[in-house]
Image (tube, coloured by chain):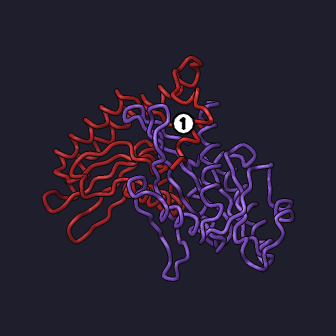
Amino acid sequence: MADFLLFDEEFHLIKDVISRLKTDAQAKVVFVVDKNGQQIAAQGDLESLDTTSLASLTAGNVAATDGLAKLIGEKEFPVLFHEGERDNVYIAIVGQRVILVVIFDEHSSLGLVRLRVRKATQDLEKIFETIQRKIESEKDRKDLDSPFAEITDEDIDSLFRE
Amino acid sequence: MTFINYAAREINCKIVYYGPGLCGKTTNLQYIYDRTNPSAKGKLISLATETDRTLFFDFLPLDLGTVRGFKTRFHLYTVPGQVFYDASRKLILKGVDGVVFVADSQEARIDANIEALGNLEKNLKDHGFALATIPYVLQLNKRDLPTAVAVDELFRQLNFKGEPTYEACAPQGTGVFDTLKAVAKQVLMELRKK
């Protein structure tokens, strides 16, 4: 399976989209993770949040729900919503590959979040299509300056030296 | 599927610990968590039942350091070992970069090991991977138990393709980091090939 590569240009485009979404939806935090649980970008009040764990659990949640969907004959559940006493989590699948997560409280509403997410999802889909195209074209480039092409045994051993 | 983030200069890889129920997958992660510098690890998350049996997965993010200017992050996962959790087990393998098979050395668990190995092969295949080509390490755990079967015999029954094989006693940590290092090394070597 091809690796997922994220370049500066698209990274900033994604950041712009989720930053706008955070403002428009009056959300606390917005982040994007891939379906394997790797965080791609995040915006908002992140200091008190363990975003790595959030990314992994979100992906687990979506994977389990995808499994449920298939069991009852659905392709996927494109939207998940968890309502808490104070904070709520709205999860939307983007282009079947990426997960958009919005955390919001009483300063916003489900309706507003849903509306703003719809627009952001379309923008993100386009960006991830570009990324996919780039990954495809990079695959054919033998001269790509991969940071790992010349990795040595010593480099790897040094990671485990304490 | 490795995630290379050129913007943040990070590389993220996913390693899954697989094996029959109660073979010591969670104990491996627990030991790694306990012995890793706080700055290099995230929270150890366990989605377990009230009796501490893994229900969905355990998750431990580890920062190993920098290779060629890229921060290397390994995300370690375990699967639920019990046979009837197969649907959840399969989900965890999505996007995996390397697999550790933790075998239970006890004689009574030989069949369970073989069944779990077959299950791994099948579930990998369903995700488009092959056990024959994916970075893979075998760990023979519980070597300290009196009922442990001889290493040669376990090797003959469980070694799939001549993969690196380590004897372990996970609660004490014997073989735990050797196993992790061996699989991490294969995953990084795989990147070199690409």
Looking at the image, which is closer to me, B17 or A9?
B17
Chain letter for the purple part:
B
Badge 1 marks a residue whose secondary structure is: loop
Extreme residue in the top direction: A143
- Report whether residue B79 is seen: yes
Mark 1 is surrounded, within 10 Å at the Cα level, by few (under 14), some (14 to 19) or many (20 or more) other residues, namely: some
Please state if B32 lies on the left or on the right of A58 as rendered: right
Looking at the image, which is closer to me, B89 or A123?
B89
Q: Which residue is mark 1?
A: A3
Please state if A117 lies on the left or on the right of A64 as rendered: left
Extreme residue in the bottom direction: B51
Query: What amino acid type is highlighted by mark number 1?
Result: Asp
Q: Give coordinates of residue B122: x percent, y percent.
A: 72, 56
Q: Is residue B143 placed above or below B158 in the rendered structure?
A: below
Chain letter for the red part:
A
Q: Give coordinates of residue A139: x percent, y percent.
A: 57, 25
Extreme residue in the front direction: A162
**Chain bearing mark 1:** A
Q: Quadrant of the N terminus of chain B?
A: top right
